[in-house]
Image: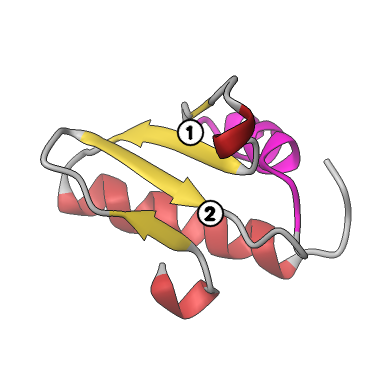
Amino acid sequence: MECMVLEVVPSETNLILVGLPTDSKSAVDAHRYLEINRVIVRRLASRAYNNDIRSMAGSRQDMTARAGILKDFMSHAKEY
């Protein structure tokens, strides 16, 4: 996800926190797009994480599919 200019916060848990660039699409739009594509993510209520999404880690296959859907989202100009 680094190649998409997304910040993946290091963690020792099974949760993945991904920060979207502040000059890019919003976490709200990412959340909607991922849900439309059957990927469950959560947004955080804290102002410090208002442009981040959180997801549970999965198998390599699941994570590759999730990264592909997120890449598609980042490449679309349309808001969701």
**Residue at horizontal 17%, vertical 33%?**
14
Q: Is residue 31 left or right of residue 9?
A: right
Judging by the rendered image, the residue that carries numbered circle 2 is: 69
Identify the mark at residue 39; answer none if there is no mark.
1
Residue 47 image offset from top left, x and y in percent = 64, 30
User: In front: 56, or 10?
Assistant: 10
**Outermost residue toward the top?**
45
Q: Callout 2: few (<14), some (14-19), or many (20+) C-alpha neighbours within 10 Å?
A: some
Q: Quadrant of the C terminus?
A: top right
Whether residue 71 is situated above or below residue 60 in the rendered picture: below
Instruction: Choose top left, top right, bottom left or bottom right for residue 12.
Output: top left
Q: CA distance from mark 1 to mark 2?
A: 9 Å
The amino acid marked with disc number 2 is Ile
Q: Main secondary structure of the magenta part?
A: helix
Residue 36, quarter of picture: top right
Amino acid type of the residue tagged 1 in the rendering:
Val
Q: Residue at x 55, y 42 (%)?
A: 52
Q: Which residues are magenta?
A: 25-38
Left or right of 59? Residue 73 is: right
The vertical placement of 75 against 56, above or below, is below
- Callout 1–callout 2 Cβ contact below 8 Å: yes
Q: Residue pushed farthest front?
A: 48
